[in-house]
C-alpha cells in the first residue's frame, strides 16, 4: 500500500516558525524517524523536539512521537507549553551573569554579552534563545551534539540564572548592595589614580 508523502521529510533541525497562539512562538529543533520492530516488519514513526517561547522571558521545550510529522509536532508543542519557565533577563536582552548547565554528557556555558553581540550559539541552543527573547549571548556546548541533551542542558543552565533582586531577597540585602560593589570599584580606582597624580 502506497503511503502519502509526509510534511517535513526526514531532515533534522528544520527551524520552523509558527504562531502557537497566546503570542507564543515555536521552533522545530529536530525531527527524527524512529522504527519499532514488530512481528511482520517495522513500524515507522516520527519524533519531534520543539521549543516554545513568548520572546519576553518565558520558554519551554517538549518532545512528541507519532506516525505522522504534524501530529508529532503538535504533541511536542503541547508538552512544551506545559513546561515553560521564566528566565530573568538584564535590560531585556541578555543574562545577568554567566551560568553553567549539564545534562547527560552535555555541558553548556552561557555568558552574558554586551549590546550588539547577537546570539552566538549552535542550532538547538539558538532556537532556545530566539524563542526566549535574548538578543545578546555567547554560548558553547561541550561534549554531546545530541539536540535533546543540548536543549536540556541549556534549560538546566537557564534554571540557574538569577536576577539581582532575587539574590538580594535571598540574602536579606538591598539590590544596591549586590550591584554596588562591582560598579563602585572602578570609581574608587579612578579616585585613587586622580589623588596620586595630584601629588
Image: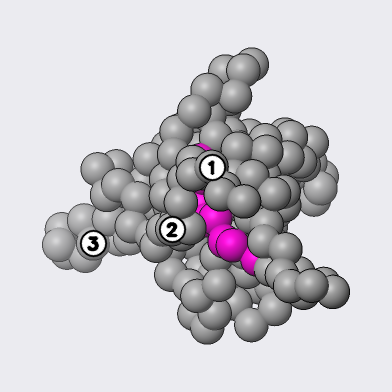
Q: Which of the two discs, 2 and 3, labels the residue nearer the N terminus?
A: 2
> Is residue 24 visible to the viewer in this orientation of the structure?
yes
> Is residue 165 visible to the viewer in this orientation of the structure?
no
Name the quarter where the C terminus is drawn.
Answer: bottom left
Q: Quadrant of residue 53?
A: top right
Image height check: is 75 above or below 56?
below
Residue hosting label 3: 193
Residue hosting label 2: 11
Residue 187 image point, x, y percent:
35, 50
Q: Quadrant of residue 163?
A: top right
Residue 186 image point, x, y percent:
35, 56
Q: Are marks 1 and 3 in contact (CB under 8 Å)?
A: no
Other residues around mark 2 within 10 Å, as few (<14) / some (14–19) / many (≥20): few
Name the residue rendered at 39%, 62% in the picture. 122
**Which of the two discs, 1 and 3, sits closer to the camera?**
1
**Which of the two discs, 2 and 3, sits closer to the camera?**
2
Q: Nearer the viewer, residue 177 or 11?
A: 11
Q: Is residue 37 left or right of residue 164?
A: right
Majority secondary structure in the magenta region: strand
Q: Nearer the viewer, residue 182 or 61?
A: 61
Residue hosting label 1: 4
Give the CA distance from mark 1 to mark 3.
76 Å
Other residues around mark 1 within 10 Å, as few (<14) / some (14–19) / many (≥20): few
Give the CA distance from mark 1 to mark 2.
17 Å
Q: Are marks 2 and 3 in contact (CB under 8 Å)?
A: no
Q: Is residue 199 left or right of residue 23?
A: left
Disc sitting over residue 51 in the figure: none
Other residues around mark 3 within 10 Å, as few (<14) / some (14–19) / many (≥20): few
Q: Secondary structure at mark 1?
A: loop
Q: Nearer the viewer, residue 103 or 137?
A: 103
Q: Are marks 1 and 2 in contact (CB under 8 Å)?
A: no
- Which contiguous range is marked in magenta? 27-34
Amino acid at each position: 500500500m502506497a503511503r502519502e508523502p509526509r510534511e517535513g521529510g526526514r531532515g533534522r533541525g528544520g527551524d520552523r516558525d509558527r504562531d502557537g497562539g497566546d503570542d507564543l512562538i515555536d521552533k522545530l529543533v529536530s525531527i527524527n524517524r524512529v522504527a519499532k520492530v514488530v512481528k511482520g516488519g517495522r513500524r515507522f514513526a516520527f519524533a519531534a523536539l520543539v521549543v516554545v517561547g513568548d520572546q519576553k522571558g518565558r520558554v519551554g521545550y517538549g518532545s512528541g512521537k507519532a506516525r505522522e510529522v504534524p501530529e508529532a509536532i503538535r504533541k511536542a508543542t503541547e508538552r512544551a507549553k506545559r513546561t515553560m519557565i521564566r528566565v530573568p533577563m538584564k535590560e531585556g536582552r541578555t543574562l545577568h551573569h554567566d551560568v553553567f548547565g549539564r545534562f547527560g554528557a552535555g555541558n553548556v556555558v552561557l555568558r552574558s554579552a554586551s549590546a550588539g553581540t547577537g546570539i552566538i550559539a549552535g542550532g538547538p541552543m539558538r532556537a532556545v534563545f530566539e524563542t526566549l527573547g535574548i538578543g545578546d549571548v555567547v554560548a558553547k556546548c561541550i561534549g554531546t551534539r545530541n539536540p535533546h541533551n543540548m536543549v536540556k542542558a541549556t534549560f538546566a543552565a537557564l534554571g540557574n540564572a538569577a536576577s539581582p533582586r532575587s539574590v538580594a531577597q535571598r540574602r536579606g540585602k538591598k539590590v544596591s548592595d549586590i550591584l554596588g560593589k562591582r560598579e563602585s570599584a572602578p570609581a574608587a580606582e579612578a579616585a585613587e589614580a586622580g589623588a596620586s597624580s595630584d601629588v
